[in-house]
Image (cartoon, rainbow, N blue to C red):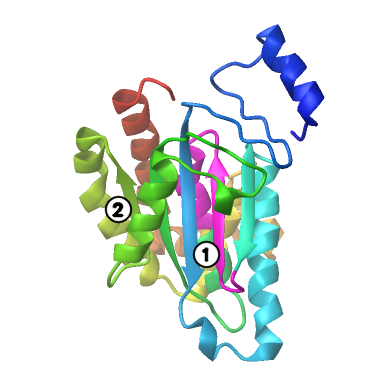
């Protein structure tokens, strides 16, 4: 939601800002202690991507984030030509979004990979452009991306219990996603994005047989991925009071 400074000040005076809302105004800093998730990422080997495929990569990132915006409150930026950052006011949505973006990039022709770091914490200053916003979540996300080695997904918080519960499982998830074939990734992506998750509906969307969809979903252990997402969401609810 974009507000001019006068409208914003009137809203502030009225007291109609709760701890779940973030207000943006061009050039105006909004101070909040709301818990958020920040997803920061960059494309692996972007310097080697041929010019004719670069637009495909950028379009995939932008259209995927735009789709997220229809499902949850999100603000995102693309910058440096190969990097991106998204702010989720509902932190539980960050992990499924990271998985979906990874799959969307993987099924491109040619395939692309992105390193992604999720930081969960508070924000002290949120602006219309995420790259100039500040706070704990931004620091955790950026530091996590700088330190990521040998993996494509990492999650960081200052909450030790949450980190303990989710850290090792995230490494397993990361390696499991890396082993999926393009066809498996396509079916899993469709499943995660679909409102109707019946195998018949997925088969119709992808123009495949139901038996083929079931076989592919089972091969990529889709239920374990769904269980991981639920575990992530449950751990957030247990360890953070502002979720």
Look at the image and tell me whether residue 192 can be seen.
Answer: no
Tell me where residue 124 appears, x and y as whole percent. 48, 34
Q: Nearer the viewer, residue 203 or 114?
A: 114
Are the residues tagged 2 and 1 within 8 Å (C-beta)? no
Reply above or below: 15 against 79.
above
Q: Residue at x 59, y 49 (%)?
A: 130
Q: Quadrant of the N terminus?
A: top right
Reply above or below: 166 against 82.
above
Tell me where residue 84 appears, x and y as whole percent. 56, 61
Q: Nearer the viewer, residue 207 or 234?
A: 234
Q: Which residue corresponds to mark 1?
A: 103
Q: Which residue corresponds to mark 2?
A: 170
Q: Quadrant of residue 145?
A: bottom left
Residue span colored magenta: 80-100
Q: Residue at x 62, y 29 (%)?
A: 22
In the picture, measured across the screen, residue 128 lies left or right of residue 165, that is right
Q: Looking at the image, how many numbered discs can be counted on the residues?
A: 2
């Amino acid at each position: 939601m974009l507000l001019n400074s006068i409208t914003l000040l009137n809203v502030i005076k009225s007291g109609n800002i709760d701890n779940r809302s973030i207000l943006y105004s061009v050039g105006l800093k909004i101070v909040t202690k709301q818990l958020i998730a920040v997803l920061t990422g960059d494309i692996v080997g972007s310097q080697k991507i041929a010019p004719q495929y670069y637009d495909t990569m950028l379009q995939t990132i932008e259209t995927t984030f735009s789709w997220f915006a229809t499902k949850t409150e999100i603000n995102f930026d693309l910058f440096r030509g190969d990097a991106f950052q998204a702010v989720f006011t509902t932190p539980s949505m960050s992990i499924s979004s990271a998985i979906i973006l990874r799959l969307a990039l993987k099924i491109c022709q040619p395939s692309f990979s992105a390193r992604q770091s999720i930081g969960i914490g508070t924000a002290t200053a949120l602006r219309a452009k995420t790259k100039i916003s500040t706070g704990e979540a931004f620091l955790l996300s950026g530091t996590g991306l700088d330190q990521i080695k040998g993996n494509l997904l990492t999650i960081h918080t200052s909450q030790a219990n949450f980190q303990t519960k989710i850290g090792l499982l995230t490494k397993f998830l990361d390696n499991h996603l890396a082993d999926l074939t393009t066809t498996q990734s396509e079916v899993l992506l469709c499943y995660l994005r679909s409102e109707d998750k019946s195998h018949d509906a997925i088969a119709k969307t992808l123009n495949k047989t139901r038996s083929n969809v079931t076989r592919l979903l089972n091969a990529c252990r889709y239920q374990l991925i769904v269980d991981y997402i639920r575990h992530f969401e449950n751990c957030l609810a247990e360890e953070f009071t502002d979720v």
